[in-house]
Amino acid sequence: MEFFKKIIDRIGVDDFAEPGAFNKWMTGAIFVAVFFCAAGLFLIFSIEGCFKRQITEEKAAVESGSNAASEAGDKGVDLFSPVRPAPASFPPDSNMPSGRESLHCGPIDLKTFDPKRDLIRFEDQRVWFESDHDTDDYEDDHMINRAVDIPLKRLVNLMEKRGATLKVQDAYRAISGDRMIHLENSLHREGRAVDLTSDQLSLGDLAKLCWQAGFDFVLYEVPKRGGQHLHCSVKRLKKDKDK
């Protein structure tokens, strides 16, 4: 109140009938109005800033919780070092280990497969996902089987050391009407297979890293219609086998 008393005193008008009194009072009124507007705007921006900060902190807490949960699931697992030595070479139309994929990863078994139980959403800002850049609503290349999680994380870390970005072209693919991108017995149907490429690494070098990252089967695939890529797959988790 003392502040406003000083403002009124500065106006210097005791009688509104004095010459120029109206202009002086208007000047004072405008000053007071501007002051209140400025104070109101300051208060609004302060409150908005607090809300934004709170939302940011809550989002960070959620992300931190997700990371903590992920790290807890990977406890005791080295996600930054190769689990196997790199092969001397990895030419097109070859795979490691030699032999059929089903011998090393087990055949598809949709009777025991449960998408709600066995699939997880893989998120990593260092990875490029094809489904984020196309218009096919039925595709989501973030969805993978839980058994793919660790070798895929390890691969991303190994590629980061090489300054390369992983591109996930295909991951989990359910049978959807006439959309038959993969065969009915493909491990993509269980999310146990991913198709990968990279712009910075040759497919031969990427195949070596996939093998070192711990995938149970790595195929340097050269389709007749083009679109060379790596098909990498894994065994079911042991607890899934026991169900």
Image (cartoon, grey):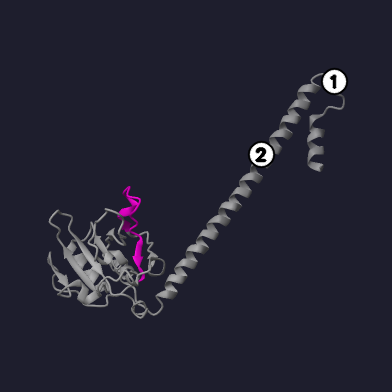
Q: Name the residue under label 2.
A: 38
Circle 1 SS class: loop
Q: The residue under label 1 is which amino acid type? A: Glu
Q: How many marks?
A: 2
Q: Distance between the residues labelled 2 and 1?
A: 31 Å
* 129 horizontally vs 217: left or right: right
Q: Looking at this view, is 103 or 18 the one in front?
A: 103
- Numbered badge on residue 79: none
* 48 horizontally vs 182: left or right: right
Observer able to see residue 160:
no
Number of other residues with Cα within 10 Å of mark 1, as a class: few under 14, some 14 to 19, many 20 or more: few
Circle 2 SS class: helix
Res 161 quadrant in image: bottom left
Residue 25 percent across, percent down from the top left: 78, 27
Q: The residue under label 2 is which amino acid type? A: Ala
Relative to residue 194, is residue 20 depicted above or below?
Answer: above
Q: In which quarter of the image is the N terminus?
A: top right
Res 117 quadrant in image: bottom left
Residue 73 percent across, percent down from the top left: 42, 75
- Magenta extent: 128-146
Observer able to see residue 71:
yes
Which sits earlier in the primary sequence, circle 2 or circle 1? 1
- Numbered badge on residue 18: 1
Residue 112 percent across, percent down from the top left: 35, 72
Q: In which quarter of the image is the C terminus?
A: bottom left
Residue 126 percent across, percent down from the top left: 34, 60
Q: Which residue is drawn at 30% across and 61% down?
A: 171
Res 35 quadrant in image: top right
Relative to residue 12, is residue 190 depicted above or below?
Answer: below
Q: Which residue is drawn at 79% across and 20% down?
A: 20
